[in-house]
């Protein structure tokens, strides 16, 4: 199975996923990123932190960006 990397990007920061995850295809990677973005946003909101402006930038094993998934907006 192909490996995909879920890098987190924002205006000022970039956190690279160094491990990646094996998934069936690009569509599965997008679904996984959407679920992870919701989970991370909910966790951060519970702790009083926000995810506005952050996105997952999904790369394949060759380094090509195959999609982006924005984190859900949170409200102060």
Image (spheres, helix red, strand yellow):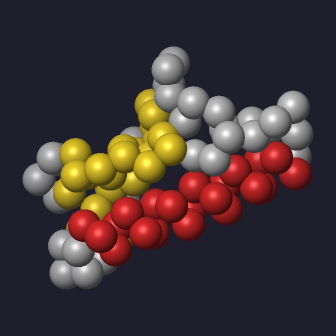
Which image quadrant is residue 32 in? bottom left
> Can residue 18 be seen here?
no
The N terminus: image quadrant = bottom left
Q: Residue sitting at 44 percent across and 49 percent down?
A: 69
The C terminus: image quadrant = top right
- The location of residue 6, given as percent across then percent down, is 39, 53
Q: Is residue 4 above or below residue 76?
A: below
Q: How many marks?
A: 0
> Can residue 49 be seen here?
yes
Specify whether 40 is left or right of 71: right
Which image quadrant is residue 29 in? bottom left
Name the one closer to the observer, 71 or 48.
71
Q: Residue sitting at 17 percent across and 58 percent down?
A: 61
Specify whether 2 is left or right of 8: left
Q: Residue sitting at 25 percent across and 67 percent down?
A: 26
Specify whether 10 is left or right of 25: right
- The location of residue 41, given as percent across then percent down, is 70, 50
Looking at this view, name the residue that lies furthest to the top.
12
- The location of residue 50, given as percent across then percent down, is 75, 36
- The location of residue 22, given as percent across then percent down, is 30, 75
Q: Residue sitting at 22 percent across and 52 percent down?
A: 66
């Amino acid at each position: 199975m192909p490996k995909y990397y879920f890098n987190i990007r924002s205006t000022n920061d970039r956190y690279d996923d160094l491990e990646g995850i094996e998934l069936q295809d690009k569509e599965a990677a997008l679904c996984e990123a959407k679920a992870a973005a919701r989970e991370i946003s909910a966790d951060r909101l519970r702790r009083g932190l926000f995810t506005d402006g952050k996105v997952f930038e999904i790369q394949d094993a060759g380094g090509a960006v195959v999609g982006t998934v924005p984190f859900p907006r949170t409200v102060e």
